[in-house]
Amino acid sequence: MKTVISVRDLEEMVRQGRDLRALPADAILTPSARDFLRELEAGGGRATPAGAMSGGAAAQESPPAKPLSSRSPRAELEAFFRSPYALSLKEQICDIGRRLWQRAYVDGNGGNIAIRVGEDLALCTPTLVSKGFMKPDDMCLVDFAGNQLLGEKKRTSEILMHLQIMQRQPKAVATVHCHPPYATGFAVAGIEPPTCILPEFEVFCAVAVAPYRTPGTPEMGKLVADLVDQHNTILMANHGAVAWSHLNVEDAYFKMEILEAYCRTVLVAAQLGRPPNTFTPQQLQDLLKIKQSLGIPDPRYGLKECELCDNADWRPGVTCAVPPRQTPETELDPEAEAAVQAITDQIMARLK
């Protein structure tokens, strides 16, 4: 199987000081990876990696030389929390928060974001602050038990879910939770979006539905974490969605954009009066090969072709109607009826 090389792979090679000329001869380069190599050639040297993302994170500072943990001395934790590297991560969280808010993926002070920064440490968003108006100084540092170690504002009340994802899935470096309307509609209905329709969704997302539990509780976090070994995007029943990434926080956010656009497209297609066209099993196998080469999990790896496009729960065109409320018949009072009849007879007699 040919290797697919993305721009993230090339950036990582640059960080590690590896020679980009040593790429496999039969490697498939994504369009952004080809652009990256062209910039290298045009510049005559090594390009500065784009890093985790743009959008306010211009200073690409290095992480601490000594890995941090909740057992690190307080002085080291405080130094990290005030460092340019931590500031760039905080700015990334703020940028993603603005994108969520601008796209109406969050409302009020809903949604939360976290980035793994140590063995059992994470930066996260504060509680009771709109994601569209956060500042770097609002961010919090927590350990994997949910204890807040640093930060002036109180950490998000739903941090346990993010931490349980990171504990269960060692590859998870960032998590994003929000309430995108179309995807949340599927979550409320308890239906996984149908598959074999759009390639972007198949390559970048692997979706499952977690049962509802009260937000912020360990029970809710566990039900979500139980799914992250084979899924990177979880619909939370009657609540919203959460995505994790093995790359960075922007990539976790990208999962949300892809999920929401896909759910919206599926619902539009379901209103057109005919079944949607779907991929053949072989076409889906080709997409799954690309997905696997990118290090993205999917429970369908290794399945037989006849098992790949099972959309048994999806029923396009079926509408739900609430039955009319049945009004019980009122029992008539015989005495009252007799009185009404007598009065009516008297009136009619006078009129004659």
Image (cartoon, rainbow, N blue to C red):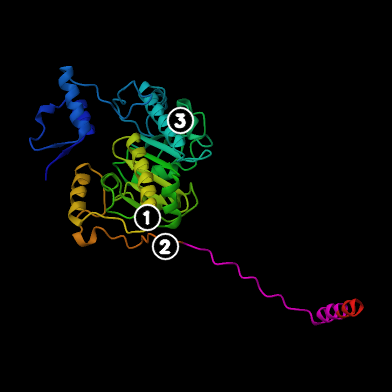
Direction right: furthest residue:
350
Direction left: furthest residue:
25
Q: Residue 337, relative to residue 81: is it above or below?
A: below
Q: Quadrant of the C terminus?
A: bottom right
N-terminal label among 3 and 2 = 3
The disc labelled 3 sits on which kind of residue?
A: Met
Q: Mark 3 — residue?
A: 139
Q: Which numbered mark, 1 or 3, is in the foreground of this view?
A: 1
- Does the image show residue 16? no
Residue 326 among those drawn in magenta: yes
Circle 2 packing at 10 Å, graded few (<14), some (14-19), many (20+), is few
The disc labelled 2 sits on which kind of residue?
A: Val
Mark 2, secondary structure of its residue: loop
Out of 256 and 230, give the one closest to the viewer: 256
Q: Position of residue 269 (x, y in %)?
A: 36, 52
Q: Residue 324, relative to residue 3: is it above or below?
A: below
Mark 3, secondary structure of its residue: loop
Mark 1, secondary structure of its residue: loop
N-terminal label among 1 and 3 = 3
**Is residue 260 left or right of 138 when viewed as pictured?**
left
User: Which residues are the magenta region?
Assistant: 320-344
Q: Are marks 1 and 3 in contact (CB under 8 Å)?
A: no
The disc labelled 1 sits on which kind of residue?
A: Leu
Q: Residue 289, relative to residue 76: is it above or below?
A: below
Circle 1 packing at 10 Å, graded few (<14), some (14-19), many (20+), is few
